[in-house]
């Protein structure tokens, strides 16, 4: 539906899509433990975007300004092995904590090459971004 809305010109797409998970643990997208407001999709759009976009069966993509993120711990994944991605996210959390960072309860998957560019998951390149802060 998102790809179709981009192709139809309803979404004036201008960059890389990001999956954002809110909360203090890594939860799988298909997990029943994932709450209603714990996952969102961010799509950068050009200034010409007229407003919200209704997606059939998925809901409304709301036009809004997203807050800037100052510090993230990152890791690049090649291919979309979902289990490996969740494992790597958990390891990144462990690394950040052991290096003195405070978790900010937000995990982001920036799609350098993802479902908007290709449906072939073996070609995906994702950057795991764990939002953190430091006391320095």
Image: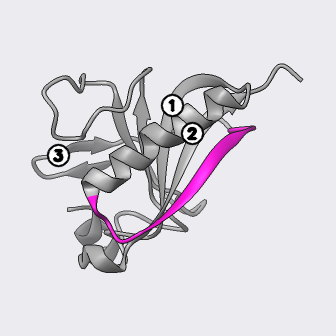
- Nearer to us: label 3 or label 1: 1
The residue stretch that appears in magenta: 69-81
Q: What residue is pinned by disc 2?
A: 130
Q: What residue is pinned by disc 1?
A: 106
Contact, CB < 8 Å: mark 1 with mark 2?
A: yes
Q: Is residue 76 above or below residue 95?
A: below
Horizontal and vertical percent for residue 9?
36, 72
Horizontal and vertical percent for residue 42?
45, 48
Any magenta on residue 32? no
- Label located before the other in sequence (1 or 2): 1
Q: Secondary structure at mark 1?
A: strand
Distance, label 3 to label 1, CA atoms, is 23 Å
Q: Is residue 131 left or right of residue 25?
A: right
Q: Secondary structure at mark 3?
A: loop
Q: Is residue 55 visible?
A: yes
x 32%, y 24%: residue: 37
x 43%, y 37%: residue: 90
């Amino acid at each position: 539906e998102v790809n179709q809305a981009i192709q139809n010109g309803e979404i004036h797409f201008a960059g890389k899509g990001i999956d954002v998970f809110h909360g203090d643990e890594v939860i799988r997208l298909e997990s029943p433990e994932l709450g209603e407001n714990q996952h969102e999709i961010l799509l950068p759009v050009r200034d010409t975007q007229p407003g919200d976009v209704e997606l059939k069966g998925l809901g409304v993509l709301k036009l809004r300004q997203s807050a800037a993120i100052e510090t993230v711990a990152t890791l690049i994944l090649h291919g979309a092995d979902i289990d490996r991605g969740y494992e790597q996210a958990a390891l990144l959390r462990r690394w950040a904590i052991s290096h003195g960072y405070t978790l900010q309860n937000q995990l982001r998957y920036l799609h350098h090459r993802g479902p908007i560019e290709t449906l072939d998951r073996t070609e995906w390149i994702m950057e795991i971004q764990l939002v953190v802060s430091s006391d320095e």
